[in-house]
């Protein structure tokens, strides 16, 4: 029986890195470096050929960085290698992240021909001055042009990213952004609150830190998001994600429900065959190591040896996942979804009733009104979501 796996493909290049971003990405890299990186990435994809016969890919997410900075021919090449190596489910969800200003009709039609069927566009704000402050290169008009171009190219599954809690943002300006997004009726909206991450330009900018909205205002933006999107027919299926019925992001659901996934590319993380690991974050080492193996693929008898030897070289932090860790992740990832976790699914996976392991914690929060249990499912209430960081930490064992 075939097992499901999902793929994350990391493209670490940006035209300019945003001032709030702490993702593994680089700006100012040469086109030659991008070409070499894509070639190395394709070599890594080929490595998996001997071990994935029993797997079917149900989702692919091409993220970054800014994947849409690459020419469509390079994305097409990556997709071709994936299709040659992995068995894809007939209607697999295949997403690419894109920044407004990097999209054009030819690029979008190229994505469609390559098999990509979902696009995630990073708007963040409809306020041009705020976009400048964030370090974004696009303006609102470019977003509109990109969205319309995606529709013309045939994309009928589009996500738009927006952010709240931005420096200088008011409730009025945030509602204006949401209203403009809703006018275009995307299938999915991700609405995140800005998090100031250590090591980013924002973290050391006093003018930014002093201009962040008060916690009460940020909380109000959060409440407004729920009400506005619900009124327009979007289901809030995870803390920060809203979808029209049937358009929930399959790839994200894999993460939240403990499914297996393979991370391809620089620094990409995996949960595969009972282990967690990530690839090296050193781009020169990644490229050089994978370039060296390109001429060794001619010998089919050595493919599995090549896979074992090369992945040992580029992987870091390889950690077996023991049952306690799997149960912890089942709870604190699954409870991020508004539908919560399944009691029967827990028992099927771990051969224990969920109350045998987490009875005191569950009874406490159900009794206090922070959680509810309906038939087979246990989930956080709205009150529980408001203090979810505290609650979820109580599901750590030992």
Image: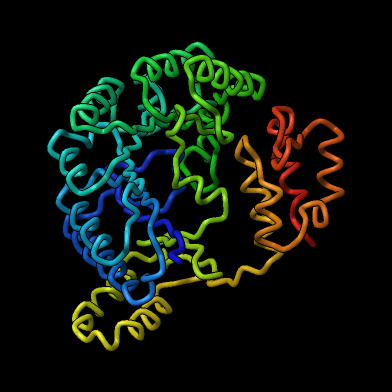
* Left or right: where 208 falls relative to 368: left
Q: Image point 47% across, 29% down: which residue?
A: 163
Q: Image point 69% across, 56% down: which residue?
A: 328
Position of residue 226 measured from the top left corner of the image (x, y, whole percent)? 57, 21
Q: Image point 46% across, 36% down: which residue?
A: 248
Q: Image point 23% across, 60% down: which residue?
A: 38
Position of residue 197 measured from the top left corner of the image (x, y, whole percent)? 54, 43
Would you place residue 238 above or below residue 261 in this image?
Answer: above
Front one among 135 and 162: 162
Tell me where residue 42 sits by quadrant: bottom left
Q: Quadrant of the N terminus?
A: bottom left
Would you place residue 329 above or below residue 53 in this image?
Answer: above
* Left or right: where 17 falls relative to 215: left
Colouring method of the image: rainbow
Position of residue 41 measured from the top left corner of the image (x, y, whole percent)? 28, 64
Q: Quadrant of the C terminus?
A: bottom right
Position of residue 295 measured from the top left corner of the image (x, y, whole percent)? 19, 81
- The furthest residue to the front: 1
Residue 64, can we see it? no
Front one among 281 and 382: 382
Front one among 138 and 106: 106
Residue 222, can we see it? yes
């Amino acid at each position: 029986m075939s097992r499901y796996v999902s793929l994350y493909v990391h493209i670490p290049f940006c035209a300019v890195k945003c001032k709030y971003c702490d993702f593994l990405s680089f700006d100012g890299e040469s086109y030659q470096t991008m070409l070499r990186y894509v070639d190395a990435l394709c070599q890594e994809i080929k490595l998996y050929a001997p071990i994935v016969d029993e797997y079917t890919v149900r989702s692919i997410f091409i993220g970054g960085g800014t994947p849409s900075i690459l020419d469509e021919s390079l994305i097409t090449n990556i997709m071709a290698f994936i299709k040659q190596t992995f068995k894809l489910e007939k209607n697999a969800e295949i997403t690419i992240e894109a920044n407004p200003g990097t999209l054009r009709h030819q690029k979008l039609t190229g994505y469609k021909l390559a098999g990509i069927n979902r696009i995630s566009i990073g708007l963040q704000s409809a306020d041009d001055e705020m976009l400048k402050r964030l370090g974004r290169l696009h303006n609102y008009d470019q977003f509109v042009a990109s969205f319309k171009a995606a529709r013309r190219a045939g994309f009928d599954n589009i996500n738009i990213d927006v952010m709240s809690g931005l420096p200088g943002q008011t409730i009025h300006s945030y509602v204006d952004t949401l209203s403009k997004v809703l006018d275009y009726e995307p299938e999915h909206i991700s609405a995140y609150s800005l998090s100031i991450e250590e090591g980013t330009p924002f973290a050391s900018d006093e003018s930014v830190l002093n201009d962040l909205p008060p916690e009460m205002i940020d909380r109000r933006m959060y409440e407004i998001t729920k009400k506005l999107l619900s009124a327009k027919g979007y289901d809030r299926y995870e803390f920060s994600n809203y979808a029209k019925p049937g358009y929930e992001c399959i790839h994200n659901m894999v993460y939240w429900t403990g499914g297996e996934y393979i991370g391809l590319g620089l620094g990409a993380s995996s949960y595969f065959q009972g282990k967690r690991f990530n690839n090296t974050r050193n781009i020169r080492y990644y490229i050089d190591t994978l370039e060296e193996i390109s001429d060794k693929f001619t010998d089919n008898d050595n493919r599995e040896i090549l896979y074992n030897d090369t992945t040992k070289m580029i992987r870091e932090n390889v950690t077996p996942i023991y049952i306690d860790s799997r149960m912890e992740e089942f709870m604190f990832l699954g409870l991020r979804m508004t539908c919560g976790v399944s009691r029967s699914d827990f028992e099927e996976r771990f051969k224990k009733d969920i109350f045998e392991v987490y009875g005191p914690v569950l009874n406490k929060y159900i009794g206090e009104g922070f959680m509810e249990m309906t038939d087979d499912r246990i989930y956080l209430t709205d009150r529980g979501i408001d203090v979810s960081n505290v609650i979820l930490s109580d599901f750590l064992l030992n």
